[in-house]
Image: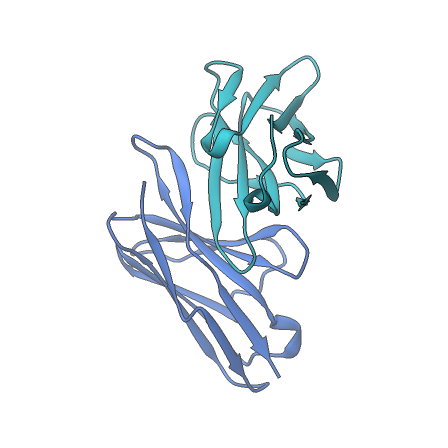
């Protein structure tokens, strides 16, 4: 399967600042990546689908102007949390989708964001 | 529409005893079903998946699950729990064909005592 990395693994920032999270597919060219958010002791909620070279598709209730997604290459997608607030503190997880042999998603290790 | 219900938020077992994590699903389409495991502050690891082939699916680390259409269930089992099995487990559903959009259950935390 695909190997997925995320950077940083954790970040602490002040309220009002912006934070960028990178998701890299290390050994697989991913046309589609997903971004999830997981609040403490809760399940994963899909935020958006990121397609290489086109605009991301956001799930209902997710503010696209607040969570900027860029998928400029087949190995990199970024999620920028703009003007972060404490309620944005969460665990953000990306995944890459392989439609071929595996037809499944491979998940990154996640990024823990804490907004003070 | 699709959804999964994990019937237990927490399951506690002793090391060496069987594990049963329950999952029921609802799907308008023929589903694919997955079990993922998440260790603290880690990403998700696929344990096993059902994609309309054999109804009894064997996964990694001795886990297996049985797809029962009549009961709309996909329970996860393991004959003998190990301390390292302590983690959060998610049951996930998606259409078996076409684009994959995963729907996660709320998770079951497995606690394993010595």
- The number of callouts visible is 0
User: Whole-percent x and y of residue B16?
Assistant: 63, 33
Where is residue A41, by image quadrant?
Answer: bottom right
Q: Which chain is cyan?
A: B
| Above or below, comparing residue A116 to residue B18 in the picture | below
The quadrant where residue A1 appears: top left
| Residue A81 visible, this angle | no
- Chain blue in the figure, letter: A
Asked if residue B53 is positioned above or below residue A24 in the image, the reply reads: above
Q: Is residue B2 left or right of residue B58?
A: right
Quadrant in which the C terminus of chain B is drawn? top right
Q: Is residue B3 visible?
A: yes
- Image quarter hosting the N terminus of chain B: top right
Q: Residue at 39% x, 51% y: name it.
A: A33
Figure check: B33 above or below B38: above
Residue A107: x and y, percent? 43, 50
Residue at x 67%, y 31% (from the top left corner): B17
| Residue at 61% over, 71% down | A88
Which colouring convention does the figure follow? by chain
Tell me where residue B12 appears, x and y as whole percent: 73, 41
**Measured along the vertical axis of the image, is residue B39 above or below residue A8?**
above
Instruction: Looking at the picture, tell me which residue is in the foreground, A14 or B22.
Output: B22
Comparing A38 with A80, the one in front is A38
Q: Position of residue B88 (x, y in %)?
A: 61, 47
Quadrant in the picture for residue A114: bottom right
């Amino acid at each position: 399967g695909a190997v997925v990395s995320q950077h940083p693994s954790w970040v602490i920032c002040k309220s009002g600042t912006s934070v960028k999270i990178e998701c890299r597919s290390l050994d697989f060219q991913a046309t589609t990546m997903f971004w999830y958010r997981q609040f403490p002791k809760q399940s994963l909620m899909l935020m958006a689908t990121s397609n290489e070279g086109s605009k991301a598709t956001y799930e209902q209730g997710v503010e696209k102007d607040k969570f900027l997604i860029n998928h400029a290459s087949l190995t990199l997608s970024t999620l920028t949390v703009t003007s972060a607030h404490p309620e944005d503190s969460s665990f953000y997880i990306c995944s890459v989708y392989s439609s071929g042999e595996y037809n499944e998603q491979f998940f990154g290790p996640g990024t823990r964001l804490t907004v003070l | 529409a699709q959804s999964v219900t994990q019937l237990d938020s927490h399951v506690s077992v002793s090391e060496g005893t069987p594990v049963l994590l329950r999952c029921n699903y609802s799907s308008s389409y023929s589903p694919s079903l997955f079990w993922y495991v998440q260790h603290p502050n880690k990403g998700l690891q696929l344990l096993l998946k059902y994609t309309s082939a054999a109804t009894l699916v064997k996964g990694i680390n001795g886990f297996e699950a049985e797809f029962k259409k009549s009961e709309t269930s996909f329970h996860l089992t393991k004959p003998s729990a190990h301390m390292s099995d302590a983690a959060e487990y998610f049951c996930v559903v998606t259409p078996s064909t076409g684009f994959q959009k995963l729907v996660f259950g709320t998770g079951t935390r497995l606690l394993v005592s010595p």
